[in-house]
Amino acid sequence: MAAGDARKHEKAIDISGLDYAFGEHEARKQVLYDIELAVAPGEFAIMTGPSGSGKTTLLSLVGALRRPQQGRIVCVGSDLMRLQGVELEAYRTGLGFIFQLHNLFPALTAFQSVQMAADLRDDLPGDKMERIASLLTELGLGERLHYRPSKLSGGQRQRVAIARALVHRPALVLADEPTAALDSQNTEIVLGLFRRLARENGTTVLMVTQDARVFERADRLVNLVDGRIDSDSRR
Amino acid sequence: MASLRTAPIFSLRLLIHEPARLWASIGGVTFALLLMLLQVGFRNALLDSALQLLRSLDADIIVMDKEKKPFLARVGMAKERLYQAQSIVGVESAAPLWLSMLQWKNMEDGTVHPIRVVGLDPDSPTFLQSEVNALIGLLRQPGTALIDSRSRSSYGYVGRGMAQVGRTEIEIVGTFPLGTDFEVDGTILVSEETYFKLTKYQRFQTHKLIEVALLKLGPDADEEAVLASLAHHLPTDAVALSKQQLIERDLEHWKSGTPISVILMVGVALGFAVGVVICYQILYTEVLDHLTEFATLKAIGYSDRYIQIAVVVEAWVLSIFGFLPAMAIGWTMLETLRQLSGLPAGLGVDDAVTILILSITMCTLAGILALRKVRVLDPAELF
């Protein structure tokens, strides 16, 4: 999956009849029930809902971090029921993951952390180093390119993690509470970046958040309750 | 696909990020390697010291009693075998050698210490050392001896002058370099006449017995043919081996036939095991401390192989940087041991290469064990 080809699929995310359960036998606990969800390329969708409603599980299924058990789940042209090995790694390489915790290596500078993600792709257009520096600068870290996480604030670390997820212009960004550690100004910057990627690259954003500041900027709000889609509204 | 080429750079960044931890890790690996190095050095001391007398003899073929094993074991042989061997076509000369163990009296403090007494014929080629050959004529004077200048300090003064060996006073007329071994602290060379004077109080000592016969071959002689001829003509109580064959036989004896050699090899194995444990602890802690970060790498598309290479490269760096100080410290310690004991404790290039290979193997094994945690790492836990 090359960067910049996000629009070539009719649907960025196409889920139907998806069930998911943790555990087996008596310990089995179903967390997702018959999920039907289609997200178009370039769409900015927010998943919200109470704790334990299955949002994060659904996000990890779309990211191929968990193996689907039942149903159909096709994302940016890949059938996730069948992915394994090198193909699975290639699929993940094409995504942009933003986790709730930044998970940056203490040994790597902001630039090196982002470079780790950029190094995964040999097909990035333009100068890779310039792209990394430019992205970090856009996220307000131009003066902190060569700082390690220990010298960065929580918000700055989170922005490094966001840059790491976006540097290769992924077709699909999966984000778990990415703005929780950011102030309003930086939240705006990050959302602006998502918007621009969607516009220029057709990048689809699927974000789990409880941050009300973000709701109004999304194209779509999907509400999950007890493992089922309770509401799905376009804005 | 993740470029595996960047894994070593990533690995180095992880390693040098915390200098204190890096130095502690290198120290741990150095300690384990030092354990191995010293055992190898002690083993070399055992093997080299046990063979140094044999190696210094000027002989192509050695004839001895068939029960004599190893060379330093004292088993007499009928002197007649010397003459029988001398009569074989191709043998240019045959020299007798006698071996015995007596007590050397330290004239400074009155203590006594075991000393090897080597009897020889001053008129026959016996030793390769030029120091011996330059002074051997002096031994024709009865009651004289040459003493090993590398004898242990427990002998007191070692040099020209009067000395007491057994119950007999002798005159030391010169020195030669040989070295101690695990049995004795030094060696003296004496003539046949002086030898029997010194050993007259020992049981079974008789002029009819010699220890070995040292044969020199003529310039055109075929060693294989002479050995075959000796085997054919000598009675079955004697055996003839080329010097090289005897060295190899003794080496094998000391390597595998003696408890001390086995103990030293067990020491090397223990050092290796300790090294694996230390290195495993270092790398496992490293992996454990970065577990979520490694999981993130897997989530964003890095393969297990990339992380494996990164951790194994860390292991290799530790093995090499642990090896260098271990060699320096080990060499210094063995050199000190050599000075203090006179034992030829030391390390050769082949030993260094072996230890380096063991070091890399040890750290790689530890790295592979530490990676078990990464293999079962589930990036889904990150969300």
Image: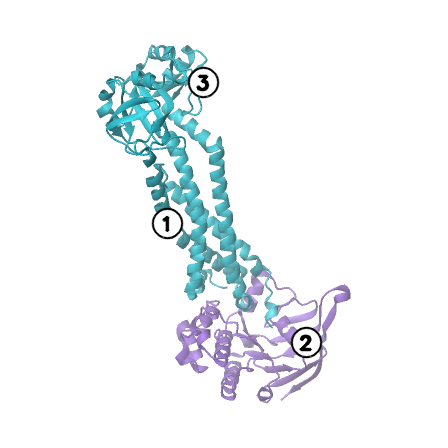
Chain drawn in cyan? B
Separation of marks 2 and 1 at Cα, in angstroms: 60 Å
Residue at the spot 52% in from the left edge and 61% down from the top edge: B285
Q: In front: A80, or B58? A: B58
**Disc 3 residue type (three-letter):** Lys
Q: Nearer the viewer, mark 2 or mark 3?
A: 3
Q: Is residue B280 above or below residue B65?
A: below
Looking at this view, name the residue that lies furthest to the right. A26
Visible in this render: residue B173?
yes
Separation of marks 2 and 3 at Cα, in angstroms: 86 Å
In the rendering, at what x and y percent does residue B86 appear?
A: 33, 12
**Disc 1 residue type (three-letter):** Ile
**Residue at the spot of label 2:** A54
Colouring scheme applied when the structure was drawn = by chain
Visible in this render: residue B217?
no
Tell me the SS state at disc 1: helix
Looking at this view, name the residue that lies furthest to the front. B110
Of all chains, the one bearing label 3 is B
Q: Nearer the viewer, mark 3 or mark 1?
A: 1
| Disc 2: CA contacts within 10 A as few (<14), some (14-19) or many (>=20) | many
Separation of marks 3 and 1 at Cα, in angstroms: 43 Å
**Residue at the spot of label 1:** B329
**Residue at the spot of label 3:** B66
Residue at the spot 29% in from the left edge and 22% down from the top edge: B169
Tell me the SS state at disc 3: loop
